[in-house]
Amino acid sequence: MAVIALAFFVADEVDAIEIPHVLYGEGHDEHRLRRPVPKVQQFVEEVVQQYSPSDFKSHFRLSRGHLEDVMTTIGPFFLSRQHSKVALLNSVLACLWTLSNQESYRGVADRFNITKSTVCLHLHEICSLVTTYLSHHTFWPTGQALHNSELGFRAAGFPNTVCAVDGCHIPIVKPHCENPVAYINRKLFYSVVLTGFCDSERRFCHVNVGHPGSWHDARAFRLSAVGRLLDEDPQSLVPEGMHIIGDSAYPLLPQLMRPYRDNGHLTARQRCFNQKLNVARVVIEHTFGLLKTKFRRLKCLYMKNIANISTAVTACCILHNMCLEEGEAIEVDEQVEAADNGPPHPQNQDAVLHRNQICDLL
């Protein structure tokens, strides 16, 4: 009886009670107006400005000096193309925050007082500008840079080395393309292949991104700009007597050294060769670890357009090189992937002879 009485009381008083707008459904005609969504106010102006230099780099990966360089370089192009009222500083910081963390787009939008769609739009915009106008931070070693890289690999036990190469899978969601199944790799998740070349200082010399995760590393390498040049004009990349080093997934070329295939009958010298090559080659694994430690969005990219994915990953590699220019010590996220040997590669007799000569010298 008490419940019934309460119901009648509520019915009698309903006209006198002001029902909050949030209780109405979206289909209610009287309340179709968009309600303001609470967001963080003045985050950049009041909070970020108070960060110490170390805190700023911890959150945004770049120092304030490098941030100024980025803004100065891409600023004129951003201002001529932007479609919103978001300031360049806020857009760049939101992009860096998004790439550096695994926070949802909604969380980033609330933090920077913008909409989720604006986060996505400006993320693609800034990444595109970085890859276009800051690509000079990723360059092939020549001159003094080549000498320094060779000295680093020599100290690791493998002389006359230009750089190291390897492939890395960047996890993605199911992409929008003609054949999304091709992007399912051997570990049964969607990914694109990042083929990276790095020097002995863990700096990317060249990257190639976007090939389907089901592709073998050797196939992605062959279709990269470096792979094509090694086939057409190898001397333009690798001086006489020098080489790139890679794992057993790559073909043996006069300019690309890989370990001896372990068939159970390797000589002591061949085992020594393999050990020294693998010790020197691990620098590319460390480089991938640094990249994913700094830009944790690469642990799973929630993008479906392959072009946007490739641009975002390439931008992270460029920003990685800019981080290294500051001489910062970074903890490596060790996630070394086992090499996928794939089908046997045809023997290149010149490469076999060159590898045997190096083996004898080691």
Image (cartoon, rainbow, N blue to C red):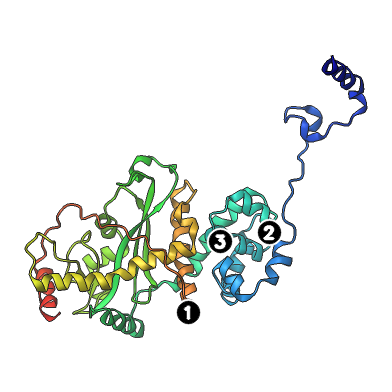
**Where does the image place residue 255, in percent across and percent down from the top left?**
20, 71
Q: Earlier in the sequence, mark 2 or mark 3?
A: 2
Viewer-proximal residue, 70 or 169?
169
Q: Which mark is residue 249?
A: none
Q: Earlier in the sequence, mark 1 or mark 3?
A: 3
From the image, tell me which residue sits under label 1.
327
For the point 90% across and 20% down, which residue is it? 9
Q: Quick one: which residue is furthest to the front in this view?
A: 1
C-alpha span from label 2 to label 1: 32 Å
Local crowd at mark 1 within 10 Å, few (<14), some, or many (≥20)?
few
Left or right of 191: which side holds 70? right
For the point 68% across and 63% down, which residue is it? 87
Q: Which mark is residue 126?
A: 3
Amino acid residing under circle 2:
Val
Viewer-proximal residue, 277 or 91?
277
Amino acid residing under circle 1:
Gly
In the picture, the quarter occupied by the C terminus is bottom left
Position of residue 220 relative to residue 269, above or below, is: above
Identify the element where label 2 is drawn.
loop
From the image, tell me which residue sits under label 2.
86
